[in-house]
Every structure is written in structure tokens, then in C-alpha cells.
Image: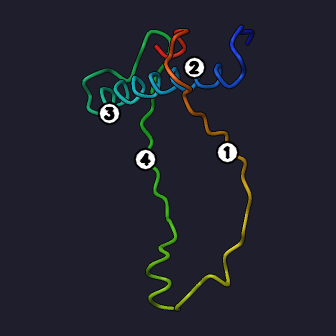
Amino acid sequence: MSSNLHPVDEIQKIREQVKVLKTREAELKAMIVSGEASKEGQFVRAQLITRKSKRFNRQAAEAELGSIDRFLVETEATILKLEIIGDDDFGLLE
């Protein structure tokens, strides 16, 4: 994607667009799940799939075993955090 924006400004613009799209996706999904909208479109057919998952309950484990810190593995991740500088004079956010 080519842009005249600085990379961090372009990332912020993309994140705002993604937020709008995710909100719309959630609205459409709710319509399909509730039956308000058909699962069959002109070009795409939706399938509703329910999956079960399990998660680790740390509080319950510690209540039973005491501290479980000895089992924790440290990892490292790089996170790109953006902060808006001043006013949005150049129309970055819509």
C-alpha cells in the first residue's frame, strides 16, 4: 500500500478503519446468528459452527496447589502502541 502518510500515521488510520469494519462485522454476524438475515448470500454462504474450548483456571489451581509461579515461562513480545499527537488537522481520523 502506497501512502503519503508517515508509517505510524498510516498504521493509526488503518487501525481506525479496522475498528469500523469489526463493528460492522459484529452487527452482520448478530443478524445472521439471530436469523434476521439469511445465511445464503448472492456470492457467499455462511456456516454457524459452535466450538467448545477449555482454559486454564489459575485461581483454582493456586487454591489447590499454592503458587504455580515455578511453572510460568517468560516470553517477550513487541507491541506497537500509537498515541495521537495534538489535533487531527490533516484528516487522519475519520
| Label 3 CA crowd tier, 10 Å (few <14, some 14–19, many 20+) | some
Residue, disc 1:
79
Give the alpha-carbon distance from disc 2 to disc 4, as whole Å. Answer: 33 Å
> Picture coordinates of residue 94 (x, y %)?
46, 13
> Quick one: SS at disc 1?
loop
> Picture coordinates of residue 20 (x, y %)?
44, 22
Give the alpha-carbon distance from disc 2 to disc 3, as whole Å. Answer: 30 Å
Label drawn at residue 33:
3
Give the alpha-carbon distance from disc 3 to disc 1, as whole Å. Answer: 34 Å
Give the alpha-carbon distance from disc 1 to disc 4, as whole Å. Answer: 31 Å
83 vs 31, left or right, is right
Q: Are marks 3 and 1 in contact (CB under 8 Å)?
A: no
92 vs 20, left or right, is right
Chain-order first, disc 2 or disc 4:
2
Tell me where residue 90 sits by quadrant.
top right
Chain-order first, disc 2 or disc 3:
2
**For the point 64% across and 21% down, which residue is it?**
9
Q: Is residue 59 above or below residue 37?
A: below
**For the point 51% across and 11% down, which residue is it?**
89
> Quick one: SS at disc 4?
loop
10 vs 17, left or right, is right
Residue, disc 2:
13
**For the point 72% across and 47% down, which residue is it?**
78
| Label 1 CA crowd tier, 10 Å (few <14, some 14–19, many 20+) | few
Chain-order first, disc 1 or disc 4:
4
> Picture coordinates of residue 21 (x, y %)?
47, 22
Task: Kindly identify the amino acid type of the residue bearing the numbered disc 1.
Answer: Ile
> Quick one: SS at disc 2?
helix
Residue, disc 4:
50
